[in-house]
Image (cartoon, rainbow, N blue to C red):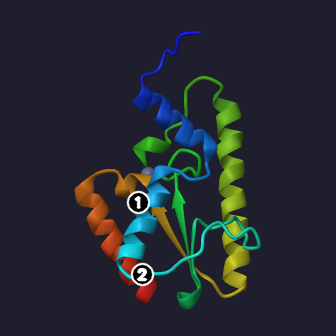
Amino acid sequence: MPDIYTRKERSEIMSKISGKETKPEIIVRKFLFANGFRYRKNDKKLSGKPDIILPKYKTVVFVHGCFWHGHEDCKYSKLPTTRREFWEKKIGDNILRDNRNQRELKKSGWKILIVWQCEIRNKGEREKRLLELIKEINV
Ligand SMILES: [Zn+2]
């Protein structure tokens, strides 16, 4: 069967599906590492398997895809018009799960920081957001 997607489109689709080592997470990790932060990743013992764990700062960072995590008022989180109810339920469940995980982490004394994918999409905004992230970690 011929591939109807270009390589770039396919890799974007796959990065959305796999949810494992997607590109935005790598961007944030690399930035933190370059700035001297040492982290662990995806610790299964922690609620929601945070993308980045900074034990020294008792801080976890989630790098959230806007669509799957229902980023409020974000153009990238717009639901498809077909199968509307299905998507509302699906994304709604994800949001509930995120909230639950974050409550658990807070209870155990973790500081939770979230980087949305749309915040690091283009270079200018990315730099701004990542510098801000460092400040948030250091607070
Ligand atoms: Zn967003």
Measured in 3D between alpha carbons, the distance from the residue under mark 2 to the one under mark 1, in whole angstroms, is 17 Å
Mark 2 surroundings within 10 Å by alpha-carbon count, few (fewer than 14), some (14 through 19), many (20 or more): few
Work out whether 75 lies above or below 49: above
Q: Which residue is painted at 56% across and 53% down in the image?
A: 21
Secondary structure beneath dot 1 equals helix
Looking at this view, is 40 or 86 the one in front? Answer: 40
Mark 1 surroundings within 10 Å by alpha-carbon count, few (fewer than 14), some (14 through 19), many (20 or more): some
Q: Which residue is painted at 53% across and 42% down in the image?
A: 15
> What residue did someone put label 2 on?
136
Looking at this view, is 68 or 4 the one in front? Answer: 4
Q: Which mark is residue 27?
A: 1
Q: Earlier in the sequence, mark 2 or mark 1?
A: 1
Q: Which residue is painted at 52% across and 50% down in the image?
A: 22
Image coordinates for residue 65, horizontal then vertical, percent: 52, 51
Residue type for callout 1: Ile
Looking at this view, is 39 or 65 the one in front? Answer: 39
Disc 2 under 8 Å from ligand 1? The reply is no
* The C terminus sits in image quarter: bottom left
Work out whether 115 lies above or below 17: below
Image coordinates for residue 96, horizontal then vertical, percent: 70, 58
| Left or right of 32, for residue 125 | left
Image coordinates for residue 110, horizontal then vertical, percent: 63, 83
Q: Quadrant of residue 37?
A: bottom left
